[in-house]
Amino acid sequence: MRPRKIEKRLDPEYLTPIYRMALLQFEQAADKLALDPNVRKRFTDPKRAIMVNIPIRMDDHSVEVFHGYRVQHDTTLGPSKGGIRYHPDVNLGEVSALAMWMTWKCALMGLPFGGAKGGIRCDPHALSRNELQRLTRRYTAEMIQFIGPEIDVPAPDVGTNEQIMAWMMDTYSQFRGYSTPGIVTGKPIRIGGSLGRTEATGRGVVYCIMEAMLHLNMQAEGKRAVIQGFGNVGANAAAILHKEGIKVIAVSDVKSGLYNSNGLDIPALRKHLENNHFVESFPEGDRVTNAELLELPCDVLVPAALSEQITKENAERISCTILAEAANGPTTPAADEILRARGIFLVPDVLANAGGVTVSYFEWVQGLQNLFWTEEEVNNRLEKIIKKAFQSVLALSLSEQVDMRLAALMLSIQKITEAKKARGLFP
Ligand code: NAD
């Protein structure tokens, strides 16, 4: 990737391939907008980055120390918002890139939030439930001054779930001395979670796919989808696509993939996974590797696992009409160029997976009002917001002759820039 002058100002810790990727995407949109250089500088570095060491007593009584991060990229539009990731590859650069993408995503959806992200470098599958609980509570305690319903609101991401959010909420509430549900979103329903939150990211991905099909004059019925990653986002997207009559012909997880050209029985697979960890134990379908899965001919490809999956190495062999980025950062800028030249219709991550943060916003609002909505209300509001955002991105993409990613980033950056100008610079 072309080195940029701006990188010289950055702390080397940030400069992982994924942060370079987020910066390059930002630079392309900033160039296209001829963004004021003073504003440009303010977007390049995160507003605040916190790194903590988290000592935990393990079940065998030894002490292990884990690295934890929280990065708040921008707070111009409101408190910052973003998930917490538990994964062995978590580092400052990755969390910072994810925080920047959250800034663009919240602005694009018109939510009153800035962007943040957090994480702990750990393998959650190698920790017991008690170890995970101690790790989560100590991480929350270390971050206590920097998070809050009006400051920065965490949510689930890879390797975390509603149980982790419940422990975070409880720890924060113990410190404050009163119950504070608004500290996190993606909580269990019984402690103030929103109906529809668990499925929201996958649902948003499907709304975007349907809009893309409408634009491309494609009938949904009988079309073939391939999904990489069968966790919260991938499995929910698969289930909703299956209901819409789209054949999900392949899915995968960290270990391996399953393929059936006639379509997999997604409800049966989900049922099977209630008692099994990995898709490989499902008796139906042929085995494929993750690399093979990405190259299967299909109508819709949905990467729903990790970043940097579609690169210049495999972009020529990707064989889909629509690429809907459910994961954050699954396509590198070099791959973007190849896909664009090949006419693949891209729905970028900041749009495709924004259903999660949108319903997180609904959860936060419902919590503040202590007034809870029905699942139908949640889904209807989500549908309106996602479809409206999709149409604005599409309109700009067509009028400016740029791809959907560049159009989405241009819209977001423009909105926050206007807000920054209105607020001025303190002091
Ligand atoms: P998850 O932990 O529930 O599931 C992740 C899935 O990906 C699992 O099936 C896992 O086995 C698989 N996986 C992990 N490493 C893999 C690899 N190297 N190759 C193939 N598969 C692999 O996580 P999730 O919440 O579903 O998040 C998935 C993606 O969606 C992430 O990029 C996340 O940032 C993004 N996202 C999540 C949400 C949300 O609401 N959970 C919102 C927006 C974006």
Image (tube, grey):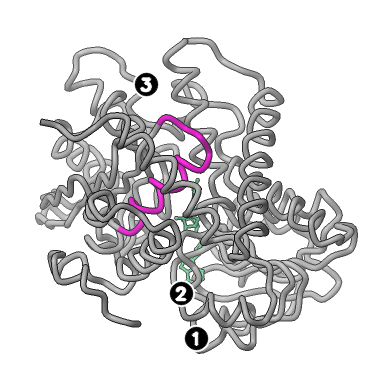
Label 1 Cα neighbours within 10 Å, binned few <14 / some 14-19 / many ≥20: some
What amino acid is found at the position of numbered circle 2 in the picture?
Answer: Thr
- Residue 312: which numbered mark, if any? 1
Identify the mark at residue 77; answer none if there is no mark.
none
Q: Main secondary structure of the magenta part?
A: helix
Q: Residues within 10 Å of mark 3 (few under 14, many from 20)?
A: many
Q: Which residues are magenta?
A: 97-112
Badge 3 vs badge 1, beta-carbon distance below 8 Å: no
- Whether residue 372 is situated above or below residue 395 in the rendered picture: above
Q: Check disc 3 and report the residue beneath it.
A: 181
Crowd band around label 2 with a 10 angstrom C-alpha radius: few (<14), some (14–19), many (20+): many
- Looking at the rendering, in which quadrant would you find the C terminus? top left
Q: Nearer the viewer, residue 259 or 374?
A: 374
Q: Secondary structure at mark 1?
A: loop
Q: Are marks 1 and 2 in contact (CB under 8 Å)?
A: yes
Give me the disc on residue 332.
Answer: 2
Residue 150 lies in what quarter of the image? top left
Local secondary structure at mark 3: helix
How far from the left and from the top, in percent, is residue 170?
29, 26
Q: Nearer the viewer, mark 3 or mark 2?
A: 2
* Residue in front for this viewpoint, 160 or 307: 307
Q: Position of residue 190 (x, y in %)?
A: 49, 21
